[in-house]
Amino acid sequence: VMDEGAGLSLAIAQVVRRLKATRLHSQLEREAKVSVPPRRAAAPHRAAPRRSSLTRSPCWERKLQNAVYRELHVLPPPGHPAASPEHAKEPLAYMREAQAGWERRILKSLNSMSTELGVPLARKRPAPEQKELSNKWNEMGTDEPGHLYLQGGRVHPVLCSSQVLISLRNPNHDRSEEVGAQSQWGLIQVPLNVQDVAQMREAFADLALNIGQLGIDDHTHVPAGMELSDFLFHQHFYTLTTQDSAAAQQYSRQGCPTGLRAELWALILNSTNEPEDILNYDQLKAGVIQYDLLVDNLIYKDVKLTASNDDYYFVFEDFLYQVLLCFSRDTTVLEHFSYNSATPPKSYIQGKAGEEDYVVVYPPNGVIPFHGFSMYVAPLCFLYNEPCKLYSVFKEMYIRYFFRLHSISSSPSGIVSLCLQFERLLQTHLPQLFYHLREIGAQPLRIAFKWMVRAFSGYLSTDQLLLLWDRILGYDSLEIVAVLAAAVFAFRAENLMEVTSLSSAEAVLADLSTLKVMPLLQIFLFATVI
Amino acid sequence: MIIEPVDCVVKAPVSLQIGDSIRPGVYVIDINFPNGQAVKIQEIQFKNYYTAFLTVRVLKMEDPGHDSTVKWVTALRDLQLMPNPHSEAGSQDYFAVHKHQMLVEMNDVSTIRLILRQPSAAWLNFTIDEIKIYKCLKEESEIDVPNWLSNLTPVEESSDLQGLPDPENVSSSIQQMWALTEIMQSNRTTVSIGRFDVKGCYEINLLSYS
């Protein structure tokens, strides 16, 4: 409960500090210098009013607005001054400990992988190898990484398992008696706040039955005398011409028209594709060519096991390698650890163990890819065919949303909350089904966890997945993923009531590619009496 | 500018309970200032640990002229620290209660009594930690312009300043330079140039566990 004015000025200071480090700031400054006569430019107090007249020009004003809007979305509100940076990452101490314990296990498995294979975590490639890789940059998937890379067979993927979440406990929580009888039903035993159905209805009010949704009502007529899809197309098209990030986000709650989705998402994420971005991407590419990392093998393995086997995504194999390898070298990703409960792994340069000057983060972006990681990128390949553009949208999606799906935190979009949200929704909507599945040893979360960890990528058909992700962006939250998981169970409830084992329950829910996302969500949230 | 919290003695929490209930729902923490001094309080900061509601009562000297009249008054009633007492939100957050939020003037306070309540039986224990009390500062200090600069106001022109530049010009150009250096200082950013190697090397064998 900080003094409101103080809180606001802290937030403004934070945004200003961050914007000063951006390209936009130098662009504005350059522009200001051009528009202000040189003699006056020397006097900063005179340049100031000029600068405001500059921002009154619509293009720059919009750019500045979008940049501020982005900062406000990405950064958590500045915490209490007395709070430690650790506390800003995650306020609950036992969550931090669980995350740290999980990280230690990953570190151990990476270290032992490196020892077993006799391969260092990172090494500089010799010049001929660099040249070879650079020549086949666009066809990395075509031949099995022969002598260049390790045989995939011996690399074990890092798994992200629900077991860690199930064993999470709050040491101060009383479990001796039937305090929260409801919570004993499910697998998640931590007392996080999750929204109940009434709160969900309010939060997702724009999904209500009377509001047109792309994905259901595409061909219904709206008052303007055209079909909804055409109407939204015009509306979105206008948003694109005005380049208004906030408006684009609001409209994407109704779904983005297929033809405009790529541009709209880029606008919502404020991912501008400027010459500097291309330079940046080239720098990352140089980092890939220069150094060989052990985590590269995790990426290869993951792409081979997931996207390459997928009917929709196998064509994008080369794109996935490029984007994921560049991502692992991107040190700007490290910024997101200020609000992520995870901490990047540390190491020392070979032969310099213990020397503070030689501490490095490994991999350079601090993110160890786990099994299924490439599925965060794969659907985006449908939208962007330039690797650079694809890359910047993916990176922004990752540091805003996807990281929450594999770090243990109390955030409402974090995987723990999503699991709990899913269990609670199912318990409230379909108590009998929940009870039945629990009795036959098929806890619903055991089936739904994999969907949620990947935000349904690889489970739904692509058009449906993109409609779902429209809403993630529109509501700036992953909670919709938990709602969909529960809605899928509700949709197959009749069949599930007849199964008698986990494997037959899994069989009932094995193929989600025929599901229509929007009707499921709408019916589950708004047309079910509880 | 770093303001140090006031020295104070935070006593151990005392539980209030009737009969043999398993766990108390109310704790009381008293805070005294050394040597019986009375303090004008600006802000109380603390870190919550599963307390749902906080009430603050203070022992105030009613009329500083006559030392005998001290009186307990309620300064804050049931501030909700956890939006839902049964679940985690707010349970381990930092809070600050500013004097503007108090129901009474926080002058001449000799003892603070914090009354903590947790109606939910879900938690084994609750308290508040890291309590810090901040005093009101005497005045808002002005730090905008260094003294030597504000003294550079044009002096009446005297005859022995012949041949020297106009003091007004000098002072304004110094002010400009000063403003420029301020801008340069505040413009210093933390942009990284995106290199992940150290001195051209990124060869790594093992990850460190610490």
Image (tube, helix red, strand yellow):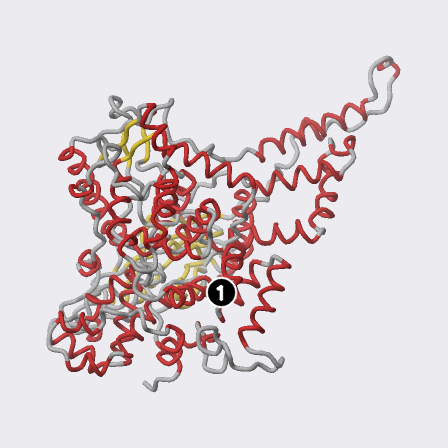
Question: Does B121 appear above or below A358?
Answer: below
Residue at the right extreme, as displayed: B159
Q: Quickly name the residue at label 1.
A: A258
Tell whether A165 sits left or right of A66: left
- Residue displayed at 32% across by 72% down: A514
Q: Nearer the viewer, residue A166 or A290?
A: A290
Question: Does B87 appear above or below A383?
Answer: below
- Residue displayed at 15% across by 41% down: A154
Residue at the front extreme, as displayed: A142
Q: Nearer the viewer, residue A359 or A267?
A: A267
Query: Residue A278: image x %, image y %?
Result: 51, 40
Mark 1 packing: few (<14 Cα in 10 Å), some, or many (20+)?
Answer: some
Q: Nearer the viewer, residue B9 or A214?
A: A214
Q: Quadrant of residue B151?
A: top right
- Residue displayed at 46% across by 56% down: A383
Q: Chain of mark 1?
A: A
For badge 1, the amino acid type reads Thr
